[in-house]
Amino acid sequence: MRGAAVNVSEVMVQYLAAAGTRHVFGYPGDPNIEFMEAARRAGLQFVLGRREGTAGLMAEAYGFLTGRPGVCMSTLGPGSSNLVNAVAGAWLDRVPMLAISGQIERRREQTFTHQVLDHNRLFGPVSKWTTHVAPDTVASVMRRAMRVATAERPGPVHITTPADVVGAEASDSAVVLPPLRSLPAPTQAFAADAHAGEVAARLRAARRPVVLAGIAAQRAGADRVLARLAEAVGVPVVVSPMAKGVLAEDHPYYAGTLDMACNALVWDFLKGGDLLLAVGFDAVELIKPWQLAVPTVHIDATPNTDQIYPADAELVGDIAAILASIVGGWQGAPKWTAAEVKQHRERLRAEYYAGRVKGKLNPTDVVDLVREALPRETIATSDVGSHKLLVGQGWTAYSPRSVLMTNGLSSMGYSLPAAIVAKLLEPARPVVCFVGDGGLAMVQGELRLAASLGLELLVIVFCDDSLNRIELKQALRNYPSWGTLLEPTDLARLAPAMGCEGVMVDSAAALSRALADARPPGRPLVVGAQIDPAQYRAQF
Ligand SMILES: Cc1ncc(C[n+]2csc(CCOP(=O)(O)OP(=O)(O)O)c2C)c(N)n1
Ligand SMILES: [Mg+2]
């Protein structure tokens, strides 16, 4: 029996609601109006990013934080091409996303030219699936899109919504079957206990095993069992940058973050092992080729098809269940003592401070002072550049998904949109955004959005008048700084014009004061930290 008529956009929105998605991040054009009206009537929140690129990065952060598809929306043509960067971010950062772009009517799509881009070819290389909706397919397409986006490894699906389709009555047979408007809740089975037993035996035989934990472990919710494994076996855990917090960094067996500052020391530590368990480690986070000859076991939701690191055994399935199976009934003395791992952490800390200049505001001072000023449950986001390498090693993370960074695509301009979403979803937790002056300049229009949403964000800008990460590479080749210098921006004046509080600081004391001063509630605070980049030069 047919129910009341629903249009294509209403069906799409029903599926978003079924997936628990309450927000659409986007920038509209003509062909989006029906979809937006359906979203409004369904009570979704529309977040108007100041360009599609940043709206898309907000959807990426939403997917990372919630595990549900982040939804972003653009118009056709320039809206779509602007959105590509964020879709590519979700692709390489392994985040579920539904990217929805309007399009001209179907009868003109093949032949008309004004603003018409071929979405399938535009988004194909950076999406798990590119598709379009039609009145007789919309429900089936949405089901598949949701499942594809969230399946391991998660990623983006791009959906084209033609102008003549969005308001048309849906006739997909699935629409008349209400149960199909709910979504499957997949669970991943792991039945290979025998193989886990073999890995446990290898672990028992090893003298110096080490764990490298990555984003798939975080996605699998394996944090608690990872801590149990570390404690029971006495095995140190190095984490990948995007997985920071999957083991609390004050845990006695936490052994550092890979490929950030001090990366040689962390690699040397791993090289000293005689068995490596790669637990949900995704090689998309590697900056340099794999350096280890240590026998390696790959434990993940997906097989080791990248072959960026060689593994002589693979346990594939629910990572938490696999670890539980290994740790179940474990007996024996710890392979490493907590004191040994602590010694390693102390070496790491000492090296992290290398190159500090007394009397100056050093980048590590900024990280330290902000960490000290904020509670454990703080969410931190980091942008891309020299500052990220120090934040990535130096920021102490205590819980999973409490650090947001892009380390797959590594696109500048991520951390401010990500911080906006973190505060929107978790208003009770302090949120700090770390960003370089180059990265902020790319996305500073979003400060106005943060202010208009009344978000009490802390935005810490590493002001060095430079695209430092690139300038340093010019210096390493004895080339002059060329095309890598930025004119300073007075953030103390920019911020108020954007509805934010703003202050420039050039000393540790001034930064401490800025962090401690009382501020009007409901306004973002932008702190321009005028750092001395000498520490970058010393370390990178
Ligand atoms: C969208 C984008 N463009 C260019 C790059 C290459 N890149 C990596 S770091 C960097 C410099 C970033 O400068 P800034 O934001 O000031 O940070 P800093 O290195 O000075 O700490 C550049 C240009 C990138 N990662 N992303
Ligand atoms: Mg800079």
Image (tube, rainbow, N blue to C red):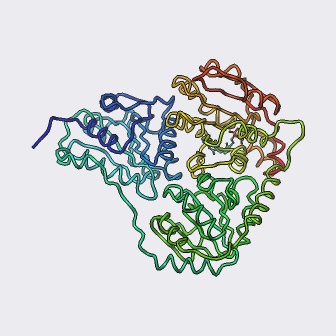
Q: How many numbered discs, if any?
A: 0
Measuring from the top left, give residue 103's x and y in whole percent.
34, 36
- Can the viewer see residue 483 in this picture? no
Q: Which quadrant is home to the N terminus? A: top left
Measuring from the top left, give residue 177's x and y in whole percent.
18, 47
Query: Which residue does the image show at 57% across and 62% down from the upper left?
Result: 226
Q: Looking at the image, is 183 positioned above or below residue 327?
A: above
Q: Looking at the image, is 218 positioned above or below residue 63?
A: below
Locate residue 38 relative to residue 119 in the image: left or right.
Answer: left
- Can the viewer see residue 468 in this picture? yes
Q: Looking at the image, is 180 positioned above or below residue 2?
A: below
List the single residue furthest toward the right. 358
Locate residue 88 relative to residue 404 in the image: left or right.
Answer: left
| Snapshot quadrant of residue 335 | bottom right
List the single residue furthest toward the left. 1
Query: Which residue does the image show at 79% across and 35% down from the upper left?
Result: 531
Measuring from the top left, give residue 146's x and y in whole percent.
35, 49
Query: Which residue does the image show at 69% across and 34% down from the upper left?
Result: 460
Ligand 1: image quarter = top right
Query: Which residue does the image show at 50% across and 31% down from the upper left?
Result: 51
In the image, 458 versus 172, the foreground residue is: 458
In the image, 397 versus 49, the foreground residue is: 397
Measuring from the top left, give residue 528's x and y in whole percent.
72, 29
